[in-house]
Image (cartoon, helix red, strand yellow):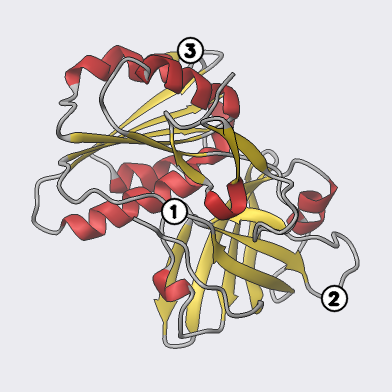
Amino acid sequence: MNNMLHINSMMSGKIIFNREIVKDHFLMSLKVSSTEPPFKEASPGQFVMLRVKGRKFPFLGRPFSIYSIYQDDGGFTVEFLYRVVGKGTHVISRLKPDEEMYVLGPLGRGFDIFPDRSCVILVAGGIGIAPISFLGGHYRRCAADKPLKTICYAGAQSANLLIGLDKMEEICSDVKISTDDGSRGYHGLVTDLFKDDLNSYSYSDSIIYACGPPAMLKGLADILKDQSIPCQVSVEERMACGVGACLGCAISIKSEYKRVCKDGPVFDIREIDWE
């Protein structure tokens, strides 16, 4: 299934709020005044490029995974969970309500949806919970009266860096938490927590989705290398253009290179060269 969309133009969005929810992690709500596609057809796992309107820095847009979308008569409200990792995101974190941003997107290839599966397993590390949450909400809305079990494994370095749990608890049948330092939930890596439960899932009726740091995704790939359960991952990579023109976000996929922004950010976990 191809979830890529044709992008017509750069849009303008106005900030509703932009607040710090835990240290260096922010939730931004952006009003985009458009009642037509592309946001009407946005797929979980897609992202947008955001650039501050009227400022010279940051000159290039920054990629933000879509956390949620709400539609009303005036257009769309799009929310982003993001972490401050450099000068560009620091500038964005200081923006106030009513300031405007340029919005390009939705971009990239989102997650494939498998309506025949009755067990959806979500594995999120840190800020990777943003696209995973959007995906979980999509499954919940589409399930209707069909029995669906959605299990989320959410991990962070410590309890004070766990984010998005309230929303996941509303969406999912169960949320299992791990912290590297043991300050909340399972003491250890989120992939180890998932590994302990792996054999309890029906491989023919389950689907795994994951997003998080490269080391987490590599660990998950190692766990699943001899298993038949399908798994799609959204990879984190630095981007400059967001549309595949600059080739700055290429990764190795089965002896060739593909662009994370254009061919991804979602890939089959077994296609990626993790070495």
Residue type at mark 1 is Gly
Please report whichever mark, 1 or 3, sits nearer to the chain's N-terminal start: 1
Label 1 close to label 3 by CB (< 8 Å): no
* Other-residue count near label 2 (Cα within 10 Å), few / some / many at <14 / 14–19 / ≥20: few
* 72 shown above or below 209: below
Distance (Cα) linking label 2 and label 3: 45 Å
Q: Determine the residue located farthest toward the front in the rendered image.
A: 255
* Other-residue count near label 1 (Cα within 10 Å), few / some / many at <14 / 14–19 / ≥20: many
Tell me the quarter of the picture where residue 122 sits. Answer: top left
Q: Position of residue 34 (x, y in %)?
A: 52, 84
Question: Which residue is label 2 attached to?
Answer: 54
Under tag 3, what secondary structure? loop
Tag shown at residue 188: 3
Residue type at mark 3 is Gly
Please report whichever mark, 2 or 3, sits nearer to the chain's N-terminal start: 2
**Residue at image coords 29%, 32%:** 230
Q: Position of residue 141 (x, y in %)?
A: 24, 59
* Other-residue count near label 3 (Cα within 10 Å), few / some / many at <14 / 14–19 / ≥20: some
Distance (Cα) linking label 2 and label 1: 30 Å
Under tag 1, what secondary structure? loop
**Residue at image coords 15%, 31%:** 204
**Residue at image coords 61%, 47%:** 259
Question: Which residue is label 1 attached to?
Answer: 110
Under tag 2, what secondary structure? loop
Label 2 close to label 3 by CB (< 8 Å): no
Please report whichever mark, 2 or 1, sits nearer to the chain's N-terminal start: 2
* Quadrant including the N terminus: bottom left
Count of marks placed on residues: 3
Residue type at mark 2 is Gly
* 44 shown above or below 206: below
Tell me the quarter of the picture where residue 185 sits. Answer: top left
